[in-house]
Amino acid sequence: MSARVLERLGEIGALVDPVMEKYLLRGASPEFQDAVLYQVRMGGKRVRPALTIASTLAVGGKEENALPAAAAVELAHNYSLILDDIIDHSELRRGKPTVWKKYGISTAILIAVHYRESITEALNDTPEPPVFHAIMAETIKLLTDGERLDILFEQSGRSDEPYVVEQRYRAVRLDDYLRMIERKTAKLIETSCVFGALSAGQRGEILEALREYGYNLGMAFQVGDDIIDIFGEEEKTGKRVGGDIKEHKLGNVVVLLALEETRDKERLLAILRKEDVSWEEVKEAISIISETNAREKAEVLRRDYVSRALKALEKLPRSEYRDMLEELAVFIEKREF
Amino acid sequence: MSARVLERLGEIGALVDPVMEKYLLRGASPEFQDAVLYQVRMGGKRVRPALTIASTLAVGGKEENALPAAAAVELAHNYSLILDDIIDHSELRRGKPTVWKKYGISTAILIAVHYRESITEALNDTPEPPVFHAIMAETIKLLTDGERLDILFEQSGRSDEPYVVEQRYRAVRLDDYLRMIERKTAKLIETSCVFGALSAGQRGEILEALREYGYNLGMAFQVGDDIIDIFGEEEKTGKRVGGDIKEHKLGNVVVLLALEETRDKERLLAILRKEDVSWEEVKEAISIISETNAREKAEVLRRDYVSRALKALEKLPRSEYRDMLEELAVFIEKREF
């Protein structure tokens, strides 16, 4: 399976770069502009706007009518990254300092607020602003709830955060996990596709087909992320394996499934609950996980979501853009980075 | 001058409480609801929504048509308070723990994000969503810029914030200050009045009159806040005087005007620039300021803005609601808390 589809989608997605910058620069004082543009100029695969544009083209829409909505979903993604990096104390993203690390936390918060307003400005240029605004508000509320759950699934840390300490989950079931990733990841990817349909003036079956495609693609994407976090090859991903274990996350499906069957459950949980998890312990945890069928089960889960995504696509007319959406799903089923 | 107008406005403003809660509860998981409602349930004078409602009633509109916009401006105000308290490390507001202090910083950020989406939901229920959305986006971007400037006017602190350290103002002129409060304070108050006009279907002269009223009222309000911060009576305000000095703020008009004429400029600046300002030093700074004409000059500034606000009101037809707006301006000219 090649990553060529990613390249083609990346080219389509890159169309939103000047559009995002136009909205971001609106109302930004000269001495604030570099700070505002930093996050979107760090790069990124632009998968979400590419989905909006490919979706609209697949159902008879025009690229230019979808650009504001496509810019909005990518801005929403970057908005959440700026805030997640603050929340998770992450200092690096794509090998560069995160926004808060580079500018300071107060400035990063102000930048994030500015991003959110740029989303509103972009959505006001869509064919039906109130419809797009309502969907975006619902999407970001769900994203927030997904992030909240992801934090509450952590097994240690944040001792200075009373809400997290009180509400933390001691156990996470598969359906808790699915609810979390549905919100944290799948919803915005679903919305990216829905925006493509709406920008083409589509409702009804076509809209629902793209929604279903986006939802299942998003779920498969996150399950894949979890698999890669534990079993990825560092030369391919550029990241150390086991980051989720180091961050005490029970919100990783591989960890979750391993806990269900391993005889070393207590030890695995003990590692996740250590205040400071060493890389040695991460390695031990991965070795415990490797002795279970967690990886295979997660692969089955990912494959199921991809099948559903592909099935939803069958309701669209054949076109090169439908092929592209299809290839993306197939790529996500196998991706290793 | 009595504060009775505040009471009457408070009653009108309180009409938005159930409306705000309706939007805030939308999409809030059960175990997140208390946290989401905490900020708006801490109280507040509800001046901004009262302005929206009184403005709409003063120009022939109906209360119920203005409620979504009124809820939106009060949500925007509370959104900015949640974030400002994080940015300023403030632990108390109205005698209660601030949101981040009570729930932790990550949760506070998620709550703030949830507030912003509730604003979108409220604005989608106004008579002309795209117009209201555009104004709110512009307003919040300006608010952000005002907060940025306020931080950059601080003379010490935030050594861990690279952007602030690099961009900090060494001197602040009166026009820098006016630009800052125009954005930080006046714009949202202006928007509150503009939303009242728009909710009544008003454009043209009536809209512009309410815009001018709101802008000048907001400017007078912030100048008053600055005067009270330095010269307030603690029994009336419930706060220690000189908080702005303790926080190194050159963005207080009284401090700014005092610096222009005092012979103790170096000492006053030295106090503002100390890493830790003691209450003893705050007292010393206030005594330096008291020897200048800064207070009188600030009073003149405040009076001028109030005059302009009152003049703008003359363009509206006489009504009990115009009277109320007038009384509020007169109250703000003299307020001591």
Image (spheres, coloured by chain):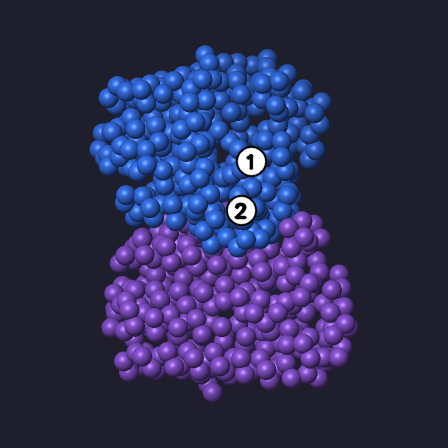
Chain colours: A blue, B purple
Nearest the camera: A38 or A52?
A38
Q: Earlier in the sequence, mark 1 or mark 2?
A: 2
Q: Is residue A4 left or right of residue B209?
A: right
Give me the disc on residue A318: none
Q: Residue at x 52, y 18 (%)?
A: A336
The residues tagged by marks 1 and 2 sit, at their Cα atoms, a distance apart of: 11 Å
Q: Residue at x 26, y 35 (%)?
A: A200
Give me the disc on residue A42: 1
Q: Measured from the top left, where is residue A183 in percent x and y?
A: 43, 36
Q: Measured from the top left, where is residue A99 in percent x and y?
A: 59, 42
Residue assigned mark 2: A36
- Would residue A193 be seen by someone viewing this image from the given angle? no
Amino acid type, label 2? Val
Q: Is residue A58 above or below residue B314?
A: above
Nearest the camera: B11 or B154?
B154
Please give the chain letter of the residue carrying mark 1. Answer: A
- Would residue B268 be seen by someone viewing this image from the given angle? yes
Please give the chain letter of the residue carrying mark 2. Answer: A
Numbered marks: total? 2
Q: Residue at x 67, y 19 (%)?
A: A284
- Classify mark 1: helix, strand or loop: loop
Q: Measured from the top left, where is residue A89 in percent x and y?
A: 63, 40
Q: Is residue A9 above or below residue B176?
A: above
- Using the rendered view, name the quadrant where residue B278 is placed: bottom right
Residue at far bottom of view: B1
Residues behind callouts 1 and 2 on a single chain: yes
Q: Residues within 10 Å of mark 1 (few under 14, many from 20)?
A: some
Q: Residue at x 36, y 54 (%)?
A: B133
Amino acid type, label 1? Met
Residue at far left of view: A204
Q: Is residue A95 above or below residue B16?
A: above
